[in-house]
Amino acid sequence: MRYRRLGRTGLQVSECTIGTSQLAAPGSDRAEARAMVAMALDQGINAFEIAADDREVIDLLGELLRQENATHRVHVFARVASRAPFELPSPHVPVQQAYPGAHIRAQTDSLLAGLGVERLALQQLHAWCPEWLGEGDWFETMTRLRREGKIAGCGVSLFDHDVDAALEVVASCAVDSVQVMYNVFDQGAASALLPRCIEHDVGVIARAPLYYGALARMRQPYPRGDWRAEYFYDEHWRETSQRVEMLASTAASFNRSVPDLALRFCLSHPAIATAATGMRTREQLKANLQALGDGPLNAEATLSLGAHKWLC
């Protein structure tokens, strides 16, 4: 396992982060999920991405970390749950309604207790709105939590393709990290956001490197009850599948699979510290580890995959 520096936090994080949202999803095998996490820890993965209000996942992961005696050696990237419902991609609600300081602190303390860790690597606000930079007490709260040793850094987690929303907050140096969608189909962050993160030493967590699994499923639809079945509505799924097939032709020319090249493409950008990938089986983990073992893509492959951008 290779490790990269997460911006100014100085944390050394594994190139692969376990996205935990699928660990307790409908249809998941809890025993298999536990075995996958144990294997990930054994293979050197030290980073996990989690929603601060996902109690089922918190309980499952906390139990496993204690069993594996790993609470002291993992980095957890948390996302605070908003107290106010809002429409995406732009929330258009005051930050004090969505993320008041007391709420951030309460969710941080609850997560620390549930996971059994002494410190979160990151506490992040989700679906960032640019006007929030000068509003509320979220920044003051994050600063205090950092001074108390409860978090190593604070960040923002962006909604899907809304990459420009973070340009100002990154330049302000108010945050230590950005979690952003970045994959073969959505390369929008590469034009302005990722260079700015390098300039200001802000760590980047790439989200959805396999585009919510679509780059690994080919033509297999998502089962009923899986939120992605609604996200990939019929027309969108048909176009996505067609584009995955075109990408498969490019992958074949390099004698590689689509998910192999997709994951490595994501990690080939120098701004990316780690790629958060949803996994719940050992088979999925093994495939991702095999891809990671071959390292970043060469210039020819990166250029070829760059031609497949679509959602940006």
Image (tube, rainbow, N blue to C red):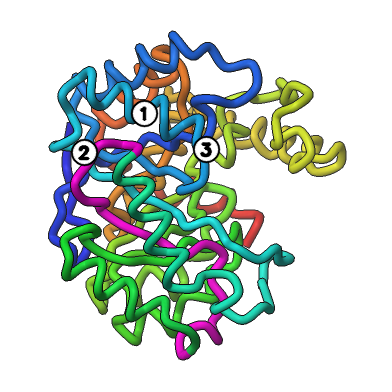
Viewer-nearest of discs 2 and 3: 2
Residue linked to disc 1: 61
For residue 299, side relative to residue 238 (left or right): left
Does any portion of residue 296 appear in the rendered image? yes
Q: Is residue 118 above or below residue 124?
A: above
The quarter of the picture where the N terminus appears is top left
Query: Going 30% across and 46% down the picture, which residue do you hit?
Result: 112
Sequence-earlier tag: 2 or 3:
2
Q: Is residue 121 magenta?
A: yes
> Mark 3, residues whose alpha carbon is within 10 Å: few (<14), some, or many (≥20)?
many
> Mark 1, residues whose alpha carbon is within 10 Å: few (<14), some, or many (≥20)?
many
Q: Amino acid at mark 3?
A: Leu
- The secondary structure type at the circle numbered 1 is helix
Residue interval drawn in magenta = 114-134
- The secondary structure type at the circle numbered 3 is loop
Residue linked to disc 3: 210
Q: Position of residue 95 (x, y in %)?
A: 55, 78
Does any portion of residue 304 appear in the rendered image? no
Q: Is residue 243 above or below residue 146?
A: above
Residue linked to disc 2: 74
Q: In front here: 80 or 129? A: 80
Q: Amino acid at mark 1?
A: Leu
For residue 240, side relative to residue 182 (left or right): right
